[in-house]
Image (cartoon, rainbow, N blue to C red):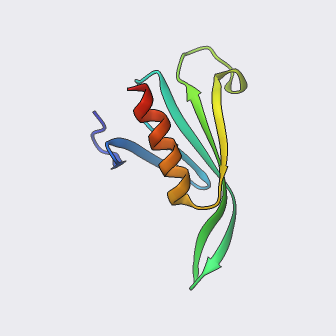
């Protein structure tokens, strides 16, 4: 399924900078998270505003048309939680 990737609750999790993809690209949907802002917590940057999008993985769709759900969250845990709920409902 997700060989070589870090997984969270059974779905692969890939991060580059402030962008996080969660889910299998071979499935019908994947979630995309964008960390909009962070704050310092004991010397570590912690996300405090994250935009979460559920997107179709269908080839040929432009990114705006691919979005089927969106939400704003105030922590990475909350963002991953809603993303997991969305993806689990579609499997």
Residue drawn where x is 42% and y is 46% of the image: 13
> If the image is split into quadrants, where does the C terminus sit?
top left
The quadrant where residue 58 appears: top right
Q: Position of residue 41 (x, y in %)?
A: 59, 80
Q: In the displayed structure, would residue 69 be above or below residue 44?
A: above
| Residue 24 in view (yes/no) | no
Q: In the displayed structure, would residue 38 be above or below residue 3?
A: below
| In the image, farthest residue toward the bottom | 42
> If the image is split into quadrants, where does the N terminus sit?
top left
In the image, 6 versus 47, the foreground residue is: 47
| Residue 9 in view (yes/no) | yes
Residue drawn where x is 31% and y is 38% of the image: 2
The quadrant where residue 48 appears: bottom right
Residue drawn where x is 58% and y is 29% of the image: 55
- In the picture, measured across the screen, residue 72 lies left or right of residue 26, that is right
Q: In the displayed structure, would residue 48 be above or below residue 15?
A: below
Q: Position of residue 17 (x, y in %)?
A: 59, 55
- In the picture, measured across the screen, residue 90 lies left or right of residue 1, that is right
Count numbered badges in the picture.
0
Q: Position of residue 72 (x, y in %)?
A: 68, 49
Q: Position of residue 83 (x, y in %)?
A: 51, 42
- In the picture, measured across the screen, residue 60 lies left or right of residue 6, that is right
In the image, 29 versus 25, the foreground residue is: 29
């Amino acid at each position: 399924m997700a060989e070589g990737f870090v997984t969270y609750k059974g779905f692969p999790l890939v991060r580059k900078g402030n962008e996080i993809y969660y889910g299998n690209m071979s499935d019908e949907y994947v979630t995309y998270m964008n960390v909009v802002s962070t704050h310092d917590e004991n010397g570590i940057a912690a996300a405090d505003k994250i935009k979460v999008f559920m997107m179709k993985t269908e080839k040929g769709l432009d990114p705006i048309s691919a979005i089927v759900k969106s939400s704003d969250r105030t922590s990475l845990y909350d963002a991953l939680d809603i993303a997991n709920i969305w993806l689990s409902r579609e499997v």
